[in-house]
Image (tube, rainbow, N blue to C red):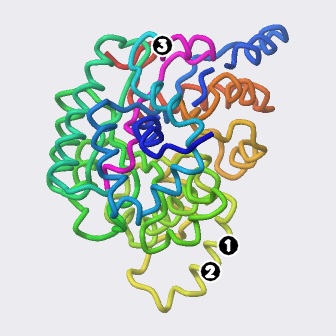
Amino acid sequence: MAFDRRDFIKGSLAAGTLLSGAAAGAAERAQSGARRHRTIAVEESFSIPEISQESVKFLMSPEGREQGWEAMARFYADQSREWGERSLDLGEGRIAAMDAGGIDVQLLLLGSMGLQSMEAARATELTALANDRLAEAVRRYPQRFAGLTALAPQDPEAAALELERGVKRLGLKGAVINSHARGEYLDDPKYLPIFEAAAALDVPIYLHPSLPAPQMVRPFLDYGLIGPMWGYAAETAVHALRLILCGLFDRFPRLTIVLGHLGEGIPYFLTRIDTQHLNTQAQRTPKLKRLPSEYFRDNFYVTTSGMNASPAVMFCHQVLGADRMMLAIDYPYEPLEEEMRAFERQPLPEADRAKICHLNAERVFRLGDGSTGK
């Protein structure tokens, strides 16, 4: 198949996997007498046409190519059109996919990572437009959709105001930030207004992946490493650790950060992170009041997005406990029915399954019981 970079970006950087169910898994559990729990999937992407078009302009520019988007395009050209079409659907097509897969509610987030590499004013304008469209979709389908406020952190003060607007005026349930902004991470003090707003509103921030930052991208450009295979997790894990180690959670002890993909690998390394933190503490500032793992267990939630078939589900259950886990698919980038079927087969106690399927999401995002909180 000939590679068409424009088709890829129109299709995929719009945001948003192969359609498709937990129906079989739910049926298997129903036959065994197990209860079907309400299901809330909390990392489900959408986009809007204006962002798709703007992304094409930026991501085909010399700056966009330099940041790795052309490499991403090569590896995902075959899937891009389908993903893009599904990400733009905020209506009956998406709901049909949810019904086929056994998902009751999707928590929608803007997955257009390229926005955070754009000029600040334009990115701020586009995220506000996306938030308005998302709020409209939630109003049309209040029993099926909830959403997170998209932020363009390039202008921290504007992002803080947009978060307040999203929560107070649009009824959205927190924020999503697609990781770094032009290689700048949120531990920089200039981004404090965003965290101050989240803390004042008492809402979570979903730290969603992006491509590795420009200063670290080169080794990821080959072999498909740049995106979901490895680059996303490597980049987002570094970002999350920077937030812990800068002392953010000493300043905002009630702040909640949500990570997808079972914590981007961090749970596997928690003990080593603690021991090496203690080994290097004499050389570090600021001093932390607690161990890194304690902040991770108390200030972070992890979701199962794209990882429902993995033994890592049960590993995270052992390391973090069901109280810190939430269900997610990563629609439309992952096959919905296969992901749900895999999750249904995880050997979880039913009380813990209920927490992961819906109880934690209802509490963290204030979704209410049986609706999106309307």
* In this rendering, position of residue 92 left or right of residue 277: left
Graded by Cα atoms within 10 Å as few (under 14), some (14 to 19) or many (20 or more), the crowding at tag 2 reads few
CB atoms at circles 2 and 1 under 8 Å apart? Answer: yes
Residue at the (28%, 50%) spot, across then down? 199
Task: Kindly identify which residue carries mark 1.
Answer: 272
User: Distance between the Cα atoms at labels 3 and 2?
Assistant: 49 Å
Q: Nearer the viewer, mark 1 or mark 3?
A: 3
* In this rendering, position of residue 298 left or right of residue 371: right
Q: x, y percentage for residue 22?
A: 69, 19
Quarter assignment of residue 310: top right
Q: x, y percentage for residue 186?
A: 34, 63
Between residues 77 and 352, which one lies in front from this camera angle? 77
For residue 285, above or below residue 232: below
Identified by mark 2, the residue type is Gln
Q: List the single residue furthest toward the right.
A: 32
Between residues 307 and 133, which one lies in front from this camera angle? 133
User: Distance between the Cα atoms at labels 2 and 1?
Assistant: 6 Å
Q: Which residues are magenta?
A: 93-116
Q: x, y percentage for residue 188?
A: 30, 70
Q: x, y percentage for residue 95?
A: 49, 13
Graded by Cα atoms within 10 Å as few (under 14), some (14 to 19) or many (20 or more), the crowding at tag 3 reads few
Task: Kindly identify which residue carries mark 2.
Answer: 276
User: Distance between the Cα atoms at labels 1 and 3?
Assistant: 45 Å
Q: Earlier in the sequence, mark 1 or mark 3?
A: 3
